[in-house]
């Protein structure tokens, strides 16, 4: 009966098989053997693979995955890429997520980065801004932790009300931050 209902609606999917609403679109145009776009929508699981990949999981230059994604620019529940956004985000240049880990810039509930981490709990080698922080230079709202391997005199911690002093010191210690990180530090507020 479900199959007949599905046929009466003109659906080419098999409802009894649990595929009602399943659609897959794949570009005929390919670049180096990779489809220009690959989109998977519906209840069925699958991995979209293309320059632009959208699906339950996705792999591509631009990847948008409901569960997991891997790409140069990646969005997903678990996301890995050069620039990454997700519940758990791992990026090289940047990551934004509940848990964000990046070489350069991480922003999240828990942020871990080499250069700049901003978050509720922020850990970085160079600079950290957040509620609880640990880095060579840090601005904290609640508390800070002495970075492992550093002595008392080899790190600087500013309480939130001294954020302007933090901004001045960050430019002194790290003059080549780049446009995005400089903009973020110039406009940071821990109120």
Image (cartoon, rainbow, N blue to C red):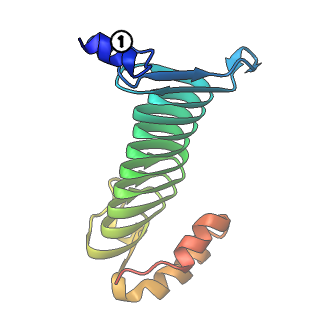
Please state if 65 lies on the left or on the right of 94 as rendered: left
Q: Quadrant of the C terminus?
A: bottom left
Report the side of 62 relative to 139 (left or right). Answer: right
The answer to whether residue 44 is left or right of residue 24 is: left
Query: Could you tell me residue 53's position as x and y percent?
Result: 56, 30
Quadrant of the image occupied by residue 110:
bottom left
Quadrant assignment for the N terminus: top left
Q: Nearer the viewer, residue 20 or 133?
A: 20
- Please give the residue where the numbered disc 1 appears in the rendered image: 14
Q: Nearer the viewer, residue 69 or 26?
A: 26
Residue, x 35% and y 12% (percent of image)? 14
66 relative to 169, above or below: above
Residue 11, how many percent across, how many down?
Answer: 43, 19
Please give the name of the residue rendered at 39% of the width and 27% of the height, measured from the top-left corner. 42
* Residue drawn at (36%, 88%) of the image: 161
| Residue 52 percent across, percent down from the top left | 62, 32
Image quadrant assignment for residue 177? bottom right
Q: Residues within 10 Å of mark 1 (few under 14, many from 20)?
A: some
User: Is 1 located above or below residue 91 in the figure?
Assistant: above
In depth, the one of 3 and 158 nearer the eye is 3
**Residue depicted at x 49% and y 28%:** 58
The relative height of residue 165 versus residue 46 in the rendered view (above or below) is below
Residue 73 at x, y = what percent?
Answer: 58, 41
């Amino acid at each position: 009966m479900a199959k007949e209902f599905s046929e009466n609606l003109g659906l080419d999917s098999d409802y009894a098989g649990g595929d009602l609403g399943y659609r897959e679109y794949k570009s005929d145009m390919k670049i180096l053997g990779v489809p220009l776009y690959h989109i998977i929508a519906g209840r069925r699981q699958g991995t979209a693979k293309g320059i632009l990949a959208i699906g339950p999981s996705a792999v591509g230059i631009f990847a948008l995955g409901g569960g997991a994604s891997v790409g140069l620019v990646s969005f997903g529940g678990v996301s890995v890429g050069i620039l990454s956004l997700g519940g758990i985000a791992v990026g090289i240049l940047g990551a934004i997520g509940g848990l964000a880990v990046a070489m350069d810039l991480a922003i999240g509930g828990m942020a871990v980065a080499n250069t700049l981490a901003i978050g509720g709990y922020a850990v970085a080698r160079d600079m950290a801004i957040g509620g609880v922080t640990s880095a060579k230079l840090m601005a904290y709202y609640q508390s800070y932790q002495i970075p492992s391997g550093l002595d008392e005199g080899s790190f600087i911690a500013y309480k939130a009300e001294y954020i302007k002093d933090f901004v001045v010191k960050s430019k002194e210690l790290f003059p080549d931050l780049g446009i995005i990180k400089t903009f973020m530090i110039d406009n940071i507020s821990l109120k």
